[in-house]
Amino acid sequence: MIGVDLHTHSNISDGRLSPEMLVDAAIAKGIHTLALTDHDSMDGVVRAQMAAQQQGIQIISGVEISGQWSRPSTKKSYGVHIVALNMQAPDALEQLLLKQKKIRAQRAEEICQRLTTCIQKDIYNDVLAKVEQMPERITRAHIAQTLLEHGIVRRLQQAFDLYLKQGKKAYVPFVGPSMVETIEVIHQSQGVAVLAHPTRYDLSATNVRFMLELFAQSGGDAVELPQRSEPAGTRQMMDRLIAQHQLKVSIGSDFHGEHMPWLALGNVPELKTGQEGIWHSF
Ligand code: AMP
Ligand code: MN
Ligand code: MN
Ligand code: MN
């Protein structure tokens, strides 16, 4: 048990626990270093830090930024997530997050409009009720949950498979900043940039290699290790690339709540000899 989890969500985005409940759950799991990394928002961080006072757990400021990576040769763009950790001067990042929140709010409306055409039902107001009427918090997970509650799908995954994922009728890309720009803003904010779950974007192995190369060349600091549940070959590929580019590593569960038991709080992979954990510099 490493006691470190640097990728978690609260109900500030698509997690099920409040920031305070997340801190309690982390303490119960024996975690001593926890980063709250909600999608495009740091609004829960101070709440988590307040809840952690005198509890023997360190809360690292964090956010999971929705950005884009374009492969230079093909110019094709892919959505990628960059986790920003341990910001000491967060102003520049907060400015970026204001833009992200506008994109998120607008995109949610557009997704719901497209869904209305598909299902002859406007679920936008029900989605909004899930995020305390704050549209900048809406993720596709909230929309999927609403579709489930309306009986339009039978499982959450089905909502993505039928409507919400790339190539489906209600898919709207998140047009966020480039990977390079994202890393720059994180560094201006005196934080570290972590490439989140590189092997969970449905990219080919070749594209994963190109993406890591650009991330490293752009000054990216660390890469998340694959989850324990990912195949051994995936981990081996990532270990090789991390060594090749001399990147540090980060470990996080991507916990969202008990409803996604395959991403359990504190269930993080172990480091291989020679790998350096990014949190040692916090
Ligand atoms: P968004 O940032 O609005 O695109 O929402 C992405 C979130 O939806 C992710 O962080 C996951 O929590 C969830 N999600 C994305 N794809 C899937 C999927 N195929 N199955 C279940 N949940 C998903
Ligand atoms: Mn999520
Ligand atoms: Mn992610
Ligand atoms: Mn995440």
Image: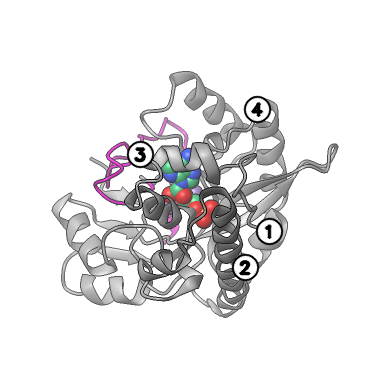
Closest to the observer, 172 or 251? 172
The Cα atoms of the two marked residues, 4 and 3, are separated by 27 Å
Q: Are marks 4 and 1 in contact (CB under 8 Å)?
A: no
Residue 236 in view here = yes
Q: Earlier in the sequence, mark 1 or mark 3?
A: 3
Q: Which residues are magenta?
A: 254-282
Residue shown at the point (45%, 61%) measured from the top left: 123
- Note whether residue 278 is visible: no
Looking at the rendered structure, the secondary structure element under dot 4 is loop
Q: Nearer the viewer, residue 112 or 17?
A: 112
Give the residue type that dot 1 points to: Val
Position of residue 96 measured from the top left corner of the image (x, y, whole percent)? 62, 72
**How far apart are the alpha carbons under marks 2 and 3?**
27 Å
Check disc 3: other Cα within 10 Å, few if <14, some if 14-19, many if 20+: some
Q: Quadrant of the rendered structure where residue 58 is?
A: bottom left
Please name the residue that numbered disc 3 is placed on.
155
Q: Earlier in the sequence, mark 1 or mark 2?
A: 2
What residue sits right under mark 1 in the picture? 175
Q: Amino acid at mark 2?
A: Ile
* C-alpha gap between disc 1 and disc 3: 27 Å
What residue is drawn where x is 45% and y is 34%? 226
Q: Earlier in the sequence, mark 4 or mark 1?
A: 1
4 or 1: mark nearer the eye: 1
Q: Is mark 2 within 8 Å of ligand 1?
A: no
Which residue does the numbered mark 2 point to in the structure image?
Answer: 103
Q: Which residue is mark 4?
A: 204
